[in-house]
Image (cartoon, rainbow, N blue to C red):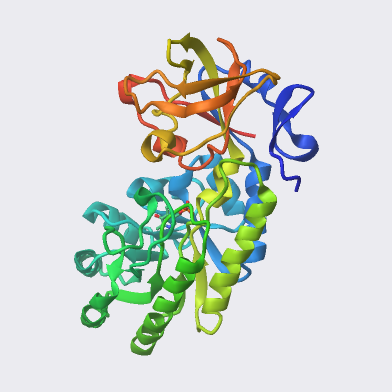
């Protein structure tokens, strides 16, 4: 695949690779309001690339990254399962053609109703995040006369280099269970073995991982735990090493990302190769981030004595990442220019955190022009809010 998925051809921004790339201005001029445009070919090629790098690893897509039905259907057709974190996501996955057996269910706050739903739909595996949750699942399973397949999400207390809001494998985080809980977990599982089947363990260190030594360390910490559980429960057969593989937002560099994928796969496969286990993973961002752009129309160019503001019809209500994490997204006008100016790119929301870029060297744009916000396919629309009663963005898959 060519390593450019957003590029100017004859002065016009095109999205996609090869001959099928789309001239974005032709698309944008017919749109009413901001729209997320997703490229199916890009997603498909990412899935296949990851499947190739992780042969014999069952992929469960973390659908909180992007749960657009067309994308869910595409991933289902590629043989990918779903990793859900709410009853709403269970419903969306089922509506998109998934069966309970294609779905695993993570998250720290599963309510009784959500657990009843998961059990009723024969979800393949519930990743349990605390002792009280384990007891709640056992109680509901007993009441529903069911036997529920579960996995223990373990927190290895390992720090990865990422934004602190998206690190999840540290003892300060609410996610997973600490290893010292193991004896109690074993005891509890044995007491409820008529209703709970321990299938394995799961791990998710956090998101936007670009270095893998901490990941290796976490796997090394969990391998003996897995073996111990396997010696206690013959049903243990699954090792889920989570998601979190990062991408580059500041540059388009798919070749370098392929190298990262290879490093990540090497760590996982080499550390887990001697286990008697079916391996699972839960990628989100890596599969879909590059495959989405958020198209928006410039409303005003506002100049103050200090700054220039490019005011768009989109903002933190559609794409929260810059406001929440200070994340970087490239922003390209659909029409190329050789002029540049420094500006903040902001939205209409009544919050000073409502920015998409700060102090950015921007290609020249004027009011009414369209811009494309790059790499918005993951954690974009799915984090949308209706703050200020602004209308939502729309979504289109091509
Ligand atoms: C969010 C999440 C993922 C996916 O993370 P990415 O960084 O998007 O790959 C995987 N597993 C769990 C439990 C998650 O919460």
Q: Is residue 350 left or right of residue 243?
A: left
Q: Is residue 145 left or right of residue 127?
A: left
Q: Indicate the quadrant containing the C terminus: top left, top right, bottom left or bottom right.
A: top right
Residue 168 is situated, as x and y percent measured from the top left of the image, at 35, 58
Judging depth in this view, the residue of 346 and 392 nearest the camera is 346
Q: Is residue 76 above or below residue 293?
A: below
Residue 367 is situated, as x and y percent measured from the top left of the image, at 55, 10
Q: Is residue 49 above or below residue 290?
A: below
- Quadrant of residue 226 in the image? bottom left
- Quadrant of residue 22 in the image? top right
Residue at the image position 61 percent from the left and 52 percent from the top: 77
Residue 248 is situated, as x and y percent measured from the top left of the image, at 57, 46
Judging depth in this view, the residue of 153 and 367 nearest the camera is 367
Q: Is residue 178 above or below residue 373?
A: below
Residue at the image position 74 percent from the left and 34 percent from the top: 21
In this rendering, the count of numbered labels is 0
Q: Is residue 325 above or below residue 221?
A: above
Residue 236 is situated, as x and y percent measured from the top left of the image, at 40, 80
Q: Residue furthest bottom?
A: 231
- Quadrant of residue 88 in the image? top left
Residue at the image position 47 percent from the left and 43 percent from the top: 67
Q: Residue furthest front?
A: 305
Judging depth in this view, the residue of 322 and 34 nearest the camera is 322
Ligand 1 is found in the corner quadrant, namely: bottom left
């Amino acid at each position: 695949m060519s390593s450019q998925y957003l590029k100017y051809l004859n002065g016009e921004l095109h999205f996609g690779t090869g001959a099928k790339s789309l001239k974005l201005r032709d698309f944008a001029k017919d749109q009413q309001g901001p729209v997320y445009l997703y490229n199916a070919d890009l997603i498909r090629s990412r899935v296949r690339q990851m499947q190739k790098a992780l042969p014999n690893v069952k992929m469960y897509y973390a659908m909180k990254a992007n749960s657009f039905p067309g994308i869910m259907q595409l991933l289902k057709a590629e043989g990918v399962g779903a990793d859900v974190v709410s009853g709403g996501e269970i419903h969306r996955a089922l509506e998109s053609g998934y069966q309970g057996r294609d779905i695993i269910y993570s998250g720290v706050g599963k309510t009784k109703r959500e657990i009843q739903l998961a059990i009723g739909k024969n979800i393949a595996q519930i990743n349990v995040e605390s002792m009280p949750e384990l007891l709640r699942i056992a109680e509901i399973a007993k009441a529903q006369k069911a036997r529920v397949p579960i996995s223990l999400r373990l927190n290895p207390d390992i720090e990865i280099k990422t934004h602190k809001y998206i690190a999840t494998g540290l003892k300060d985080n609410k996610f997973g269970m600490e290893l010292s809980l193991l004896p109690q977990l074993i005891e509890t599982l044995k007491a409820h073995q008529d209703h709970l089947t321990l299938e394995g363990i799961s791990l998710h260190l956090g998101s936007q991982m670009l270095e893998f030594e901490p990941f290796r360390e976490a796997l090394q910490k969990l391998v003996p735990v897995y073996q111990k559980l396997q010696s206690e429960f013959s049903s243990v057969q699954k090792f889920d090493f989570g998601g979190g593989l990062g991408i580059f937002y500041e540059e388009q560099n798919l070749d370098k990302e392929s190298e990262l994928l290879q490093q990540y796969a090497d760590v996982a496969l080499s550390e887990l190769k001697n286990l008697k286990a079916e391996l699972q993973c839960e990628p989100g961002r890596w599969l879909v981030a590059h495959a989405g752009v958020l198209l928006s129309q410039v409303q005003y160019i506002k100049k103050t004595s200090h700054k220039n503001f490019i005011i768009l019809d989109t903002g933190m209500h559609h794409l929260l990442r810059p406001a929440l994490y200070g994340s970087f997204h490239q922003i390209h006008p659909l029409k190329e220019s050789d002029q540049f100016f420094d500006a903040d790119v902001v939205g209409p929301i009544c919050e000073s955190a409502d920015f998409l870029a700060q102090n950015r060297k921007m290609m020249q744009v004027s009011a009414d022009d369209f811009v494309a916000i790059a790499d918005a396919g993951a954690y974009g629309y799915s984090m949308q809010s209706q703050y200020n009663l602004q209308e939502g963005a729309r979504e289109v898959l091509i």
